């Protein structure tokens, strides 16, 4: 009976991986289409997220492609990978991979609000735990470091956060990144 359950679990994981690949490809093509057809500017870059809570470190890496379809507005697609591990003791290691779709709006020069939807495949000690959804909302500050390059930092709060899942230790996320306009 356990073999049948494990086999079904493997089949489901393969279907989710195929879905992520398809969504990533579709997202990139949609972003490129929007950039080519409607955008004022195409943007590439990425960010690094981090958090330390209760001696647990979380690091998040996410490349990004996006555009500005309207003045002061940005949309982007971002695949990501994050890793969560205890700093003081050996124990559970959690890995997350998934996709984000985000929107930002600049309120005043240098200050923006941010909203995104994220889904992640979560593994604890290399065992599949399921798909988790997040809805981080927040604000950030950006600073032009050259005519086409912006550095930014953001503080986000996941409104779908639940302490009972493996997705995160805290609802807060801190991100820093760089965005380059082509």
Image (cartoon, rainbow, N blue to C red):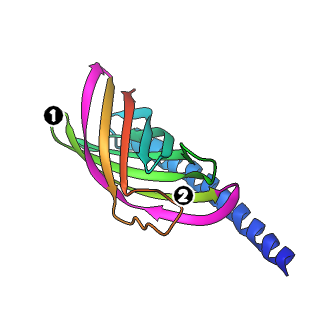
Badge 2, how many Cα within 10 Å: few under 14, some, many 20+?
A: many
Q: Quadrant of the N terminus?
A: bottom right
- Of the numbered discs 2 and 1, the one sitting upstream in the chain is 1
How far, Cα to Cα, is label 2 from label 1?
32 Å
**Residue 84 position in % (x across, y down):** 55, 48
Q: Is residue 81 above or below residue 109?
A: below
In this rendered view, identify the residue nearer to me: 147 or 30.
Answer: 147
Q: In this picture, which residue range is highlighted in magenta?
A: 124-148
Question: In the rendered structure, does residue 157 fall within the stretch colored magenta?
Answer: no
- From this view, report whether residue 151 is shown above or below residue 20: above
Residue 135 location, x and y as percent? 38, 60
Would residue 40 be visible to someone looking at this image?
no
Which residue shows up at 36% across the image and 43% down it? 174
Residue 42, image x and y in percent?
39, 34
Residue 138: say if magenta: yes
Answer few, some or many: residues within 10 Å of disc 1's Cα (few below 14, many 20 plus, some between 14 and 19): few
Query: Quarter of the image holding residue 137?
Result: bottom left
Look at the numbered disc 1 and give the secondary structure of its residue.
loop
Main secondary structure along the magenta-highlighted residues: strand
Q: Residue at x 77, y 73 (%)?
A: 8
User: Foreground: 67 or 7?
Assistant: 7
Q: Residue at x 63, y 60 (%)?
A: 19
Numbered disc 2: secondary structure = strand
Q: Is residue 135 left or right of residue 73?
A: right
The answer to whether residue 139 is seen in the rendering is yes
Q: Residue furthest top?
A: 146
What residue is pinned by disc 2?
A: 120
Q: Is residue 103 above or below residue 63?
A: below
Q: Quadrant of residue 127?
A: bottom right
Residue designated by label 1? 109
């Amino acid at each position: 009976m356990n073999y049948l359950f494990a086999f079904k679990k493997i089949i489901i994981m393969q279907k989710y991986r195929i879905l992520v690949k398809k969504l990533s490809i579709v997202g990139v093509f949609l972003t490129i289409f929007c950039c080519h057809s409607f955008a004022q500017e195409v943007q590439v870059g990425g960010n690094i997220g981090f958090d330390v809570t209760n001696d647990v470190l979380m690091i998040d890496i996410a490349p990004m492609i996006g555009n500005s379809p309207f003045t002061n507005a940005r949309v982007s697609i971002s695949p990501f990978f994050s890793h969560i591990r205890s700093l003081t003791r050996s124990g559970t290691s959690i890995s997350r991979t998934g996709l984000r779709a985000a929107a930002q709006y600049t309120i005043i020069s240098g200050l923006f609000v941010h909203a995104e939807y994220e889904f992640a495949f979560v593994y604890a000690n290399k065992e599949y735990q399921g798909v988790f959804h997040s809805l981080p909302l927040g604000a950030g500050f950006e600073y032009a470091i050259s005519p086409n390059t912006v550095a930014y930092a953001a503080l986000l709060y996941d409104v779908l956060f639940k302490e009972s899942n493996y997705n995160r230790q805290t609802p807060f996320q801190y991100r820093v990144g760089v965005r380059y306009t082509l």
